[in-house]
């Protein structure tokens, strides 16, 4: 099997490329590598989408030449697993906050801090728990942000479904490429 690009790249560069996969309802779901896209196209589980002007790649085997576009749409319905909001715990909060203190940006000696202290009626929920370094957590203590004179770098919120996150970023990138 040989791979050639319609833009003149070599086969190894083409194999490193990715294809955006859309649902039957035209919602961007994820990116897959070229090999996975070929399997979806050959097994009729996906079809090419032609709303972009960019070509794609041609893949040649001994008896088949297939055009792999940059965007494909699934033709099958997938019973996706139900996605649940993960529990509020240290690992998930650190992941959401990119392992950085939400007060100073440090990545060392991280703890969890309740923005509104629990002793003052704050809850252990996604919108009230942030990653904080020991120094900032100690400095804030049992006070509110206003009382401690501190500010959050980002507003805490619950994680969103990965497909929604991908779709948001995809449309932002598409808008940027059209300008």
Image (tube, rainbow, N blue to C red):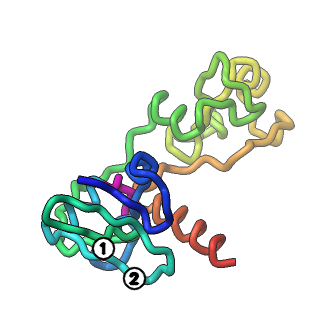
State the extent of the magenta-drawn residues as a range: 29-34
Q: Secondary structure at mark 1?
A: strand
**In the figure, 135 relative to 55: above or below?**
above
Local crowd size for mark 1, using a 10 Å CA cut-off: few (<14), some (14–19), many (≥20): many
Distance between the Cα atoms at labels 1 and 2? 10 Å
Q: Position of residue 53 (x, y in %)?
A: 50, 80
Magenta stretch prevailing secondary structure = strand
| 47 and 144: which is toward the camera | 47
| 95 and 78: which is toward the camera | 78
Q: Was residue 31 drawn as part of the magenta stretch in this picture?
A: yes
Q: Position of residue 101 (x, y in %)?
A: 68, 30
Q: Residue at x 45, y 55 (%)?
A: 160
| 27 and 53: which is toward the camera | 53
Of tags 1 and 2, the one toward the viewer is: 2
Q: Was residue 19 drawn as part of the magenta stretch in this picture?
A: no
Q: Which mark is residue 50?
A: 2
Q: Quadrant of the C terminus?
A: bottom right
Give the left or right position of residue 74, taking residue 71 as reference.
left
Local crowd size for mark 2, using a 10 Å CA cut-off: few (<14), some (14–19), many (≥20): few
Q: Residue at x 17, y 67 (%)?
A: 64
Give the left or right position of residue 143, taking residue 163 as reference.
right
Q: Residue at x 44, y 83 (%)?
A: 51
Residue wearing tag 1: 73
Q: Secondary structure at mark 2?
A: loop
Q: Earlier in the sequence, mark 1 or mark 2?
A: 2
Give the left or right position of residue 3, taking residue 97 as reference.
left
**In the figure, 51 relative to 73: above or below?**
below
**In the figure, 167 relative to 103: above or below?**
below
């Amino acid at each position: 099997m040989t791979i050639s690009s319609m833009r003149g790249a070599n086969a190894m560069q083409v194999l490193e490329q990715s294809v955006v996969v859309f649902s039957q309802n035209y919602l961007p779901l994820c990116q897959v590598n070229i090999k996975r896209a070929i399997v979806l196209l050959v097994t009729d589980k996906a079809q090419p989408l032609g709303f972009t002007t960019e070509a794609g790649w041609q893949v040649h085997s001994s008896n088949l030449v297939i055009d792999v576009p940059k965007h494909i749409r699934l033709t099958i319905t997938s019973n996706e697993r139900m996605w649940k909001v993960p529990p509020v715990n240290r690992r998930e909060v650190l992941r959401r906050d990119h392992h950085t203190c939400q007060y100073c940006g440090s990545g060392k000696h991280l703890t969890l801090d309740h923005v509104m202290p629990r002793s003052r009626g704050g809850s252990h929920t996604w919108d009230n728990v942030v990653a904080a370094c020991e120094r900032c957590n100690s400095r804030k203590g049992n006070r509110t942000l206003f009382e401690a004179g501190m500010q959050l770098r980002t507003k805490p919120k619950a994680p969103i479904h990965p497909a929604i996150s991908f779709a948001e970023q995809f449309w932002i990138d598409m808008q940027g490429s059209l300008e």
